[in-house]
Image (tube, helix red, strand yellow):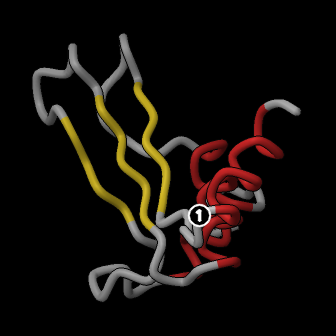
Amino acid sequence: MEGEEGVLVFTEGRGLITLGWIHTHPTQSCFMSSVDLHTHSGFEYMLCESFAVVCAPKSTLKYMSLLSLHSPFLTDRSQLWDILSHRPANA
């Protein structure tokens, strides 16, 4: 048993839930790429309160960021859909 299956067995066997995920951008700035947004949308599909943490140790602007697609500050979901569907904005 490996990877995601192992995590599922571990968490379910202990009555735990996965609240979110953490990943790094070792050489980039702190942002959520389209791949990150796709990954995170799957987490939020299963649990709307889930969150993502991005750590960018070499970033000069921001070292860490927390994201939830259900954030009250995300008011224009059409932009998010454009990102997830790989369409340019205002297309």
For label 1, count other residues whose C-alpha is less than 10 Å away and answer few (under 14), some (14-19) or many (20+). Answer: few
Q: Is residue 87 above or below residue 4?
A: below
Residue 23 lies left or right of residue 78; in this view the side is left
Disc 1 residue type? Answer: Arg
Q: What's the residue at 66%, 72% (across, down)?
A: 81
Q: What's the residue at 11%, 31% (across, down)?
A: 61
Element assignment for label 1:
loop
Q: What's the residue at 45%, 34% (across, down)?
A: 23
The image quadrant of residue 80 is: bottom right
Position in image of residue 4 (x %, y %):
77, 43
- The one of 43 and 25 positioned closer to us in this rendering: 43
Position in image of residue 24 (x %, y %):
41, 27
Quadrant for the N terminus in the image: top right
The image quadrant of residue 58 is: top left
- Residue corresponding to mark 1: 14
- The one of 28 and 50 positioned closer to us in this rendering: 50
Given the current orientation, which residue lies at the most extreme front position? 14
Residue 24 lies left or right of residue 33; in this view the side is left
Position in image of residue 17 (x %, y %):
56, 69
